[in-house]
Each structure stands twice: as structure tokens, then as C-alpha cells.
Amino acid sequence: MPEHDRMLHHPPQDSPSPQDQPEATAPLPPEVPEDVDPADPLPLLREGCARWGLTLSPRQIQQFVTHYVELVRWNQRVNLTAITDFEDVQVKHFLDSLAALPLICQELEEPLPPTRPLHLVDVGSGAGFPGIPLKIVAPRLKLTLMDGTGKKVRFLEQLVAKLALSNTQVVQGRAEELGRQMAYRGQFDLVTARAVAPLNTLVEYLLPLCRRGGLAIMYKGPGAAQEFMEARRAIEILGGDVVRFAPVQVPFLPEQRFILLVKKVRHTPQQYPRGQGLPRKKPLT
């Protein structure tokens, strides 16, 4: 409003009221590099999401900052990840985790981010990838984080509390064991895994957890095509049908990534998943 108009409507004041003061930007934690702008702390993540049509709110940005800070702190005593550089985490962890979301929404005919309260289980979640970034961006998801290592489970529990994530639980256990329990078998709309195992092993971990009509989502690198060929029979045996095997370009990442979407079209036979490490030792062929 021009100054002369302001004076017509408000009496002069010696100093602005508290309501008129610009909101101060909170200082960033010491784990964040000093040259980072507190007003725009995650520019690579923000810009990468914008390329997919995702706009992050200030709260979501802060949640991602908190995820980074907790990751760096815990990584000093628990082996969570070899990637801790501030920019690398934005690209190789956060954006890489989100790369499947546009494909998932296309397949389910959902808006981006999805609005249905889909139940997602992240198998071998470890440092929280891809489950936590997906939950931050799509808060209506109901999230279960699954990991077999106690120290990583404790990290995930602390992280979920710090981020104040609703409808989120952390479960300790191996997928090959929990996939045989009725509380988890066939219970999930979406089942994700990133950097867990070769595809012909991975599908035996994931598909038993997936409900009929649900999706198993697997994140893979440059060797995905060969792995896919070796996993096709296992996918069929376990009740799956490949609906998408797509290269994806993660913003700011030169390496090629692939996303495999497998729809659960039949019940998984009762003998799967096999125990005693057999999915890894003797993959289905």
C-alpha cells in the first residue's frame, strides 16, 4: 500500500507493531554448512521437486533439514550411509527416494502427491530411504518402516518422533520372516525397497507383503536391465505382473536410475517367502 494511503487509514506510530515485523529465519543447526542460506536451505531438493510439479512447504523443508541433521549425528556411531555431504544427500538420498512418486501416482491415477491414505511399507529402510522422504512429501500416506537391525530401528524411531510424523510405525524384523505373519502378509498398498538386494531376491521379500492390486516398487541402478531379465520368472511365481520398468532421471544426478513397478495380481503361494536366507542364497529362477 502506498505510504500516503497508509497514513489516511492508520495513525502514525513510532515503530512497527510486532505483527508488522518480518518473521525472523531460524538459524540452521551446526551440521548444516555455514554458507547455506537459512531462507532457502535445500535449493537442490526444492528445484528438483519443482521439476516434478511438487511444491514443498516451509514445514516440509524443515523436516528434510531435520532428517539430514539426525542422519549426520547418528551416522557417527551407527553405519547408516556413506553419503553425508549436504548437497549429495539432497540429490542421492532425498530426490532419489522421491523419483518413483510420479510413476506411482500415474499408475494409481492419483494426483501428485497422492491424496488417498495408502499404506506403504518400506523394507530394509535403514536410514529412512525412500520411506521418510515419501511420507514428508505425501503426508496422507500411512507408513511402516521395516528393518532387521536394532540400531537402525532405534534411529528410525527417533527420527519419526523428531519429525512428528503421524500414522507411522517402525517394525524390527526381516521381510522373509514378517512376510509369513498375518499382521503383515498381504496388508500393504505399496511396498518399497531401495538398495536392498538383487531383483530376483528382492521380489520374494516384497510381493508377499503386498495386497492384491497393490504395487511393489523397486529402485535400481545401471544394472537393472540384466537383473530384471533374471527376475521375471520369480515375479510370476510370486503373483506379480510387471506394469512399469522405466528409466528415471533424478534431477542433478548424472547416473541413470530405473524404477520397477510390479502389480500384485495373484496371491503369493503359501511357501513364500522362504526362510533361512534362501531368497538370497538360492533366488527363484
Image: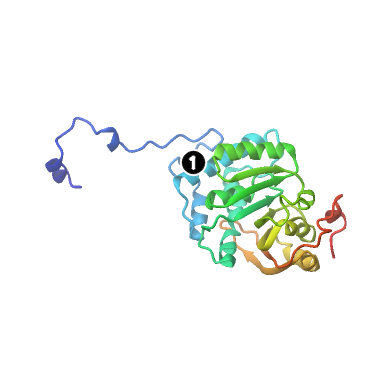
Q: Describe residue 61's horizontal placement relative to residue 98 as left or right.
A: left
User: Residue 213 sits in which quadrant?
Assistant: bottom right
Closer to us: 240 or 229: 240
Closer to us: 155 or 206: 206
Which residue lies at the image location 54% right of the left edge and 37% below the top edge? 32
Q: Is residue 133 above or below residue 238?
A: above
- The amino acid sitting under disc 1 is Val
User: Residue 235 sits in which quadrant?
Assistant: bottom right
Q: Describe residue 34's horizontal placement relative to residue 267 as left or right.
A: left
Which residue lies at the image location 46% right of the left edge and 41% below the top edge? 37
Q: Is residue 279 above or below residue 5?
A: below
Q: Please provide percent x and percent y for residue 141.
A: 57, 52
Q: Please provide percent x and percent y for residue 111.
A: 50, 62
Which residue reaches farthest left? 8
Residue 277 seen anywhere in this rendered image of the structure:
yes
Quickly name the residue at label 1. Answer: 36
Q: Residues within 10 Å of mark 1 (few under 14, many from 20)?
A: few
Which residue reaches farthest top? 14
Quadrant location of the C terminus? bottom right
Closer to us: 275 or 101: 275
Q: Describe residue 232's horizontal placement relative to residue 25 as left or right.
A: right
Which residue reaches farthest front? 182
User: Residue 206 sits in which quadrant?
Assistant: bottom right
- Judging from the image, what secondary structure is the residue with disc 1 in? loop
